[in-house]
Image (cartoon, rainbow, N blue to C red):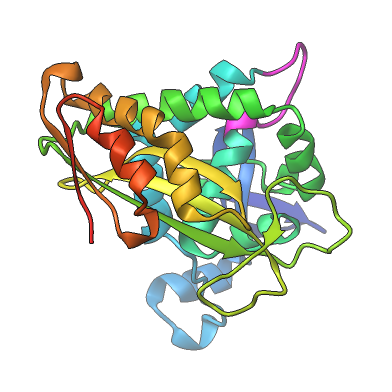
Amino acid sequence: MAHLHKKMKNGKPYYYVREIARVDGKPKVIKQVYLGPPERLIALIKGDKDKCSRISVQEFGALWLAHQIEARIDLISIINSVAPKKAREIGPSTGEYFIYAVFNHMIDACSKQSLSDWYKGTAVQYIRPVDIDSLTSERYWKKWDRVSCEAIEEIASKFFKKVSEVESPKSDCFLFDTTNYYTYMAGQTPSELAKRGKNKEGKFWLRQIGVALLVARDTQLPFFYREYEGNRHDSKEFQEIIEPIVSAMRQPSGGAERELTIVFDKGMNSEDNIAIIDTVPRVHFITC
């Protein structure tokens, strides 16, 4: 809440606008703007433009919208249910660290090292108050190290289930596709996923990661994803994940009794893949 705050310096009053919010359950000054002595304050009230020397411009709209989306999904609670706080642990939870990184990637992605500086240029304290100085890359990666591969899969499962509850698809058609993302990871850095392979940008010398995604046709919301090695062919990956894809399609669509259709491009085409889909009851496909 914003309020006018007076400080006495050498027997003279000086005024500030202070905003206080609860961070980790405790009241904290999240913003303080210097206004000056009473004479300057009066000039500002009267609209003396010469007395106004600075304007604060902050990112608000996109951040507010991202927060509204998270409020419906409650991703923080999902993450914290899998990776809870340790005893006597203070500061943002694992879920909160992740969501602040997600917000940044949704709006203007930067490195974890630059995350706190980026948030200082936003109106986050009006939207979701946080101790910005605690959003350091060191603390973020310490939280990340506590989340195992099994925990990520559990988080993803709970996330997709919540998505289907919030906005269940009415269509019986799902769209499936794969892509890859190249990285600048050093060649000597060990990784099971980052491999050199063909990519659309033609940067074959860079290590990349493949990602498969299934979305509902009507809502375009995701219901399944899988990351895989960057040098793995799309059709080979598709063959291995057809079963969990069908399971993901059936979960929000009323079980195994409903007729379902999956649409995919020629990159997934192979006689083996088509044969597998043909053996699944009430599941059809469209491809090119």
Residue at the location (67% across, 56% down)?
A: 115
Look at the image and give the residue range highlighted in magenta: 85-95
Query: Quick check: 104 left or right of 275?
Result: right
Q: Main secondary structure of the magenta part?
A: loop
Q: Is residue 70 above or below residue 24?
A: below
- Residue 28 sits in which quadrant? top right
User: Which residue occupies the foreground of this view, 140 or 82?
Assistant: 82
Residue 242 x/y as whole percent: 38, 35
Evaluate whether residue 88 shows in this view.
yes
Question: What percent of the width, then of the height, locates residue 46?
Answer: 39, 75
Q: Is 87 included in the stretch rendered in magenta? A: yes
Left or right of 30, for residue 69: left
Q: Where is the C terminus found, in terms of image quarters?
A: bottom left
Task: Judge whether 128 appears above or below 114 on screen.
Answer: above
For the question of whether residue 1 can be seen, the reply is no
| Magenta highlight on residue 57 | no
In the displayed image of the protein, which residue is found farthest to the top?
87
